[in-house]
Image: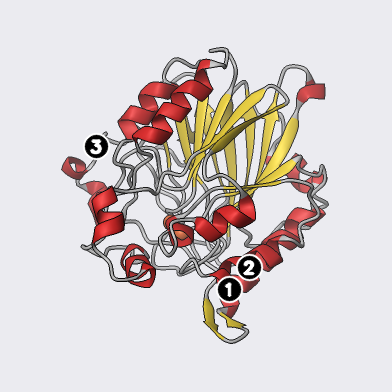
């Protein structure tokens, strides 16, 4: 079903990416008429972190610099680049400026940005918005409707009434498992906007949605969760084919809920381990419909890597190249109606191979 297999992809990228560990997605949207095919690259979660003066955390800088370098070498050249959020670690002007400076080395005309919680909670997106524009928006490209949401909002009371400073608020929200944090949400105002936006789109138009947090409920304690996910899913339900891409989780995830395929992207900065409670079904709402094999959380760089995505007739095929593990492909299976690992869906991933 894929218009471009892994070997083709490597050939088309000159083999330059083979063996590298870059968390970059190349997404191809393929149509029956090949003239309409196009690709875009997807980079996420760089967490550029300021130390002091002109010093930034070097590893996070290097992850983004290498990714930008690879994106510049891609052939065919992606039509545009998506950035999935968490460009900064603590949302400061220094971090956002430095991150955008690294991104400015991209030789692409257009880069679209998604808001991450690490970009947002210092000044509620004010500086980000001045640099990059609205926090939620949509655009059409070659017959596909793209929607970008800010899914990391939360209750007004939490946002506005509890903190003596933006720094204090950011420090709490930046923690992965801080019990003083608050669940992410899209919110009523943005859902109203989404309803209006989608009302102008034919139900047969492929819809691709980008959020930072998953628009499904995976694990609340780590905010791998969007509180009003079901209400957003209802707005997406009338469309024939919907794909949601998200960052934030720094690991491979995939799922199918009704007509919506969900796929995460890896981070350029670091991999998060898989929460143990993934196995505790009671904590999941909804239950994940596809059992997922896991990369090994004990390898610090496992679940970082690069990936590319074909979208064919509105369904996505993701090809992952992991530094410390077997390459993997997760593709939509028309027989079962859900994304599945093409090799390891029913078997455990074999022991890690070290390259
Ligand atoms: Fe992140
Ligand atoms: Fe995040």
From the image, state whether disc 1 or disc 3 is nearer to you.
1
Residue 258 placed where, x, y %?
A: 38, 22
Residue 148 placed where, x, y %?
A: 54, 38
Front residue of 49 and 271: 49
To which quarter of the image does residue 106 belong?
Answer: bottom right
Quadrant of image for the C terminus: bottom right
Furthest residue in direction bottom, as rendered:
53
Tag 3 residue: 285
Answer whether residue 8 is visible to the viewer in this image.
yes
Is residue 9 depicted above or below 120 in this figure?
above
Tag 2 residue: 97
Question: Gap between marks 1 and 3, in whole Å?
Answer: 38 Å
Ligand 2, what quadrant?
A: bottom left
Quadrant of image for the N terminus: top right
Tag 1 residue: 94
How many C-alpha atoms fall within 10 Å of the one at disc 1: few (<14), some, or many (≥20)? some
Residue 69 placed where, x, y %?
A: 75, 62
How many C-alpha atoms fall within 10 Å of the one at disc 3: few (<14), some, or many (≥20)? some
Q: Are marks 2 and 3 in contact (CB under 8 Å)?
A: no
Q: Is mark 2 within 8 Å of ligand 1?
A: no
In the rendered structure, the answer to whether residue 263 lies left or right of residue 311 reads: left
Question: Gap between marks 1 and 2, in whole Å?
Answer: 5 Å
To which quarter of the image does residue 311 belong?
Answer: top right
């Amino acid at each position: 079903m894929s218009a471009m297999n892994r070997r083709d992809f490597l050939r088309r990228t000159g083999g330059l990416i083979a063996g590298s560990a870059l968390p970059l997605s190349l997404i191809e949207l393929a149509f029956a008429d090949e003239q309409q095919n196009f690709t875009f690259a997807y980079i996420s979660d760089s967490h550029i972190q300021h130390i002091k003066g002109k010093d930034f955390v070097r590893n996070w800088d290097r992850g983004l610099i290498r990714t930008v370098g690879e994106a510049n070498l891609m052939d065919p050249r992606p039509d545009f680049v998506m950035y999935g959020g968490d460009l900064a670690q603590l949302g400061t002007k220094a971090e956002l400026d430095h991150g955008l400076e690294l991104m400015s080395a991209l030789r692409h005309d257009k880069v679209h940005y998604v808001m991450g919680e690490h970009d947002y909670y210092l000044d509620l997106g004010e500086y980000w918005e001045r640099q990059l524009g609205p926090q939620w928006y949509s655009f059409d490209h070659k017959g596909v409707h793209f929607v970008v949401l800010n899914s990391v909002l939360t209750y007004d009371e939490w946002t506005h009434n509890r903190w003596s400073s933006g720094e204090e608020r950011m420090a709490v929200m930046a923690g992965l498992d801080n019990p003083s944090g608050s669940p992410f949400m899209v919110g009523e105002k943005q859902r109203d906007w989404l309803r209006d936006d989608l009302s102008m789109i034919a139900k047969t138009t492929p819809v691709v949605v980008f959020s930072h947090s998953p628009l499904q409920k995976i694990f609340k304690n780590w905010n791998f969760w969007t509180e009003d996910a079901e209400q957003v899913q209802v707005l997406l339900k009338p469309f024939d084919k919907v794909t949601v891409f998200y960052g934030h989780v720094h690991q491979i995830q995939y799922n199918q809920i009704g007509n919506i395929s969900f796929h995460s992207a890896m981070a350029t900065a670091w991999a998060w381990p898989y929460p143990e409670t993934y196995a505790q079904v009671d904590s999941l709402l909804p239950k994940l419909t596809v059992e997922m094999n896991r990369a090994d959380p004990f390898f610090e760089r496992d679940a970082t890597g690069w990936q590319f995505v074909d979208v064919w007739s509105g369904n996505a095929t993701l090809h992952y190249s992991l530094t410390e593990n077997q390459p993997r492909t997760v593709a939509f299976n028309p027989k079962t109606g859900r994304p599945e690992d093409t090799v390891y869906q029913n078997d455990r991933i074999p022991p890690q191979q070290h390259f």
